[in-house]
Amino acid sequence: MATRTFPFSTLINKQTSVFPALDDADVILERRDAENLVLMRSERFEAMLKGLGLAARSLAIIAKANRALAEEVFAEELPWLTWLPAEARPGCVRELLDHLLAGAETGLLLPFSRALREWQSTAEIYSDPELASRLRGPFDASDATELHRPGDDDA
């Protein structure tokens, strides 16, 4: 699906230039000091949710019948899974599938997005053996840096 981008102020000041764009595209409204917003026709939104729900439930059924196949499918789409230790991959796939399925049912996909980001960050740490080793510890107190919070008095 195509997207068109407009400054948020255009929606407020010139609605007639934003709403016609929704005929053939979703609209991203860029805001200066906040997250961008997306406008889309409800028919496209409902179709997206139904498609996502069907795909998530289908993948969950496959995962229950053949966990290795589900892992293979995810690994195809998420190549960074190869950086995770072999024993962590099934847990990653299970957690991501569970979040995706719940999100498809409820429309709340932020938990899935967070879990995906967290697992990818974990995999990236494992991709660097030196960093992974340092993060496992032990930690040397002499390497610690004292942090000061803004507003703390140093006097």
Image: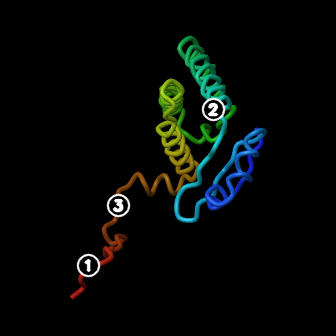
Q: Which residue is mark 2?
A: 42
- Quarter that holds the C terminus: bottom left
- Identify the residue at the far left of this view: 155
Residue 59 lies in quadrant: top right
Looking at the rendered structure, the kind of residue marked 2 is Ser
Residue 151 picture location, percent across and down: 29, 78
- Residue at image x 54%, y 26%? 104
Crowding at dot 2, Cα within 10 Å, few <14 / some 14-19 / many 20+, comes out as few
Q: Earlier in the sequence, mark 2 or mark 1?
A: 2
Crowding at dot 3, Cα within 10 Å, few <14 / some 14-19 / many 20+, comes out as few
In the image, is residue 141 above or below residue 91? below
Q: Nearer the viewer, residue 130 or 33?
A: 33
Looking at the rendered structure, the kind of residue marked 3 is Phe
Q: Secondary structure at mark 3?
A: loop
In the image, is residue 22 above or below residue 146? above
Q: Which residue is mark 3?
A: 139
Q: Secondary structure at mark 1?
A: loop
Residue 134 picture location, percent across and down: 44, 57
In the image, is residue 132 above or below residue 53? below
Q: Which residue is mark 1?
A: 152
What's the distance in space between the residues labelled 3 and 1, CA to CA?
26 Å
Looking at the rendered structure, the kind of residue marked 1 is Asp
